[in-house]
Amino acid sequence: MSTPRLTEPVVLGPRTAPSRVMFGPHETNLAHGRALSPRHVAYYARRAAGGAGLIVTETASVHPGDWPYERAPLAAECGPGWAATAAACAPHGTLVVASLGHAGSQGSSAYHQSALWAPSRVADVVSREMPMEMEEPELAALRAGFGQAAELAADSGLDGVEVEAGQHSLLRQFLSGLTNQRQDAYGSDRLLLVREVLAAVRTAVGEDRLLGLRLSCDELAPWAGITPQHAEDFARELAPLLDYLVVVRGSAMSSSATRPDFHTPPGFNTDLCAAVRAAVAGTVAVVLQGSVTGPGHAQQALDDGVADLVEMTRAQIADAELVALVRAGHGERVRPCVLCNQKCRVRDNRNPLLSCAVDPRSGHESEDAPDVSRLTTAPTADAGGDTVLVVGGGPAGLEAARVLAGHGRRVELVEGQEQLGGMLRGVGERWAPLLDWLESEVRRLGVTVRTATTAGLREMTGRSVVLATGSRPGPRRCDIEGGTVLEAAEVLAGRAVLPEGAVVVDDPVGDATGVALAERLAAQGREVTLVTPDQVAGTQLALTGDLADAHVRLQRAGVHLLRRSVLRAALAHAALVEDVLSGEQHKVACAVVVHCGHRLPDTAPVVDGAVLAGDRVAPRTVHEALLEGRRAALALCGMQGGTV
């Protein structure tokens, strides 16, 4: 069998990457102050060990007047972290380059309390803040900042620098007619500042290190912004100055476009990247970026000549060993990225540490035990240990069984339903790849699986037990006065049949459940009203970047939104709702109410010494279910990262 091009080395200017897979720059909130931390080093080193060919570190601001989010790295403070990252990745041959940038008017003045820089006095469409127009002193400081940061990166042992001219960048703002309305040379020649910055960086790093550019090639605002036609011209002119070019899309006008969720097809930049690569005609290596999550898709892009390398950032957050598994001929073992954005999108005011809904170890490499089962055949069980009983075959139970078996423990998994996956199996195709992967892994690792089987106290007594029996309906805040109220989980799983007629979806939580259920029912031809106490429906979708797009989908589906409202009673043929501000009540005609509220842990008996996991601890998200399943397993193995 021939080696997939994805895992082959590729020459980039003066350096050679061991594979054609890039791990791109992204916010992590792993910094200590504004410096790269040991968490960063462990995070990048794990991807290098997993076969990444090129790692681009989190974008560092080249000037202290740029502080776009609280834990944003500052290049002047990144030298030790860059050096440690280079040293940690060197044994694997992975190239490491520093992303350098300035957010301009897309930054924040909340931390440095100074005016934002911009090419022109155009208020940012997100923050609504009016920036200052840069004059020569600021332009000179910016050029010098890029040069000094690049020199520090080179002195720290990195393989080069990537200049940020993508969605969140001042350089993009100079390239765009949306934000550059200058009357001087930087307005008549919008590429001028980019060329000056690239020249300063090349002087600093020399010819023996890489110089890459991340370029917004479509702002999705064709009335004035960068279009694909502009991008082709930009790329042709800049290609001789570069060793590689990353094709991205988006701007402040389209903030969900750069890291969309599963509603956007994977590989959404494929056609754009192919056009730019054709424009440069082989003069520079071109990188495909844009929700490329599967090795097959990445390989196809290379085979079709779309790109020379493929950026698979979220895919390698979900599975750091992706390249190594493909290289070993085990691509089917790659843990799937489901594009949920729940834990890898961290640019919000809570400052959450980056992690992954399907791999809770991501971002926590410096404190969590390695996953020993990934690159090996099924380990031999420890004949001296007892068989661990895992009760419950949802995500928490499956993860506990997988980790236990991976550490050599004999495991028996029992599930009351005919199919593994628990409540998550009923929510649709979004999570099916993860459940299929978990089931495949536990069977590969030799776990004894028994479905349609229950385990009581007698079966659990005297054994090591992980109890992951899920959840039950939580309290409802409405009275039932002749009406019908069903639980969202039962409806999604197909265990509850909706009567004919209109549906009221009661969503007191504001996460993805209510919105997704309303969309699904509307697609089935139902008349749907979504009731929420919040100012906007699905308010928590702001954390995953889907809030605005979700409202567009709801409107197109014809879903009626009742905001600032609570459900008071389910009546015969109607729901009684109340405005949370005025207290005014009115009826909404419906045949059934579907409750999307919080749930409570299952009440099945607990044997002494059992370790609880997933919804049995507290019903929350898939991430917490997997995290607690993993922790339960590690605790029983006496491993670091486990908690009982």
Image: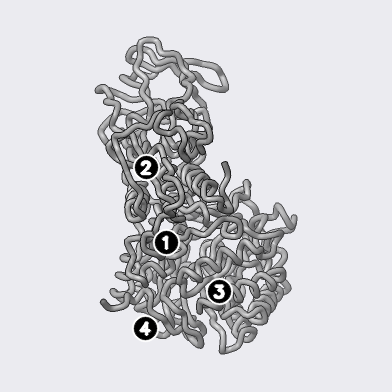
> Label 2 neighbourhood size at 10 Å, few (<14), some (14-19), many (20+)?
many
Q: Which residue: 35% across, 68% down?
A: 298
Q: In this view, does 320 lie above or below 619?
A: below
Nearest to the observer: residue 486 or residue 517: 486
Q: Is residue 515 above or below residue 31?
A: above
Distance Cα–Cα, label 2 vs label 1: 20 Å
Residue 516 place in picture, x, y as percent: 38, 38
> Label 3 neighbourhood size at 10 Å, few (<14), some (14-19), many (20+)?
many
Nearest to the observer: residue 447 or residue 629: 447
Question: Label 3: which residue?
Answer: 89
Secondary structure beneath dot 4 equals loop
Secondary structure beneath dot 3 equals helix
Distance Cα–Cα, label 1 vs label 4: 39 Å
Circle nearer the N terminus (1, 3)? 3
Q: Is residue 533 visible?
A: yes
**Decide: marks 4, 3 in contact (CB < 8 A)?**
no
Amino acid type at image mark 2: Leu
Question: Label 4: which residue?
Answer: 281
Q: In this view, does 385 lie above or below 594?
A: below
Q: Which residue: 66% across, 63% down?
A: 37
Report the mark closest to the observer, 3 or 2: 2
Report the mark closest to the observer, 2 or 1: 2
Amino acid type at image mark 3: Cys
Amino acid type at image mark 4: Ala
> Label 4 neighbourhood size at 10 Å, few (<14), some (14-19), many (20+)?
few
Residue 550 place in picture, x, y as percent: 42, 43
Q: Which mark is residue 374?
A: 1
Amino acid type at image mark 1: Arg
Q: Can residue 223 be seen in this view?
A: no
